[in-house]
Amino acid sequence: MDLNAQVEKLIRDTLALEEIYVKSEGTHVQVIAVSAEFTELSRLKREQAVKRPLADLIADNTIHALTVKTFTPEQWVRERKFIMPS
């Protein structure tokens, strides 16, 4: 399984996501996650929720750098036009 698919599966298995976009280049991974679960969480707690299932990949250096952007579905409707995942 490639790294993008592995990261997506690990996060999807943990969080109820509306949408997720994963892009990797080598050991650098970018994640955009959209979930209603984020509504009551601070930005820090949202990021921790996304990073937690990736702990083993970070520990064994499969992921060296991780960028996480999280949105509620309402925020994503407003922000998606500015953040076009490729």
Image (cartoon, grey):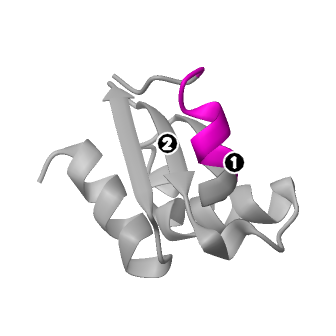
> Would you name the residue on which mark 1 appears?
75
Whether residue 3 appears in this view of the structure is yes
Which is nearer the eye, 2 or 75? 75
Up/down of 74 relative to 18, above or below: above
Where is residue 36, by image quadrant? bottom right
Q: Position of residue 25 (x, y in %)?
A: 34, 22
Q: Give the magenta range.
A: 75-82
- Secondary structure beneath dot 1 equals helix
Query: Which is nearer the eye, 44 or 75?
Result: 75
Q: Nearer the viewer, residue 76 or 61?
A: 76
Circles 1 and 2: CB atoms closer than 8 Å: no
Residue 9 lies left or right of residue 30; in this view the side is: left
Q: Residue 21 at what x, y percent from top left?
A: 39, 43
- Picture quarter with the C terminus: top left
Expressed as whole percent of the image width and height from the top left, the position of residue 65 reads 56, 32
Queried whether the magenta region covers residue 79, the answer comes back as yes
Picture quadrant of residue 51: bottom right
Of labels 1 and 2, earlier in sequence is 2
> Residue at 47% across / 79% down in the picture?
14
Relative side of 10 to 50, left or right: left
Q: Residues within 10 Å of mark 2 (few under 14, many from 20)?
A: many
Residue type at mark 1: give it: Gln
Residue at mark 2 = 31
- At label 2, the amino acid type is Val
Please report the residue visible at 65 percent of the width from the left and 50 percent of the height from the top: 70
Magenta stretch, overall SS: helix
- Examine the structure image and report whether residue 63 is included in the region drawn in magenta: no
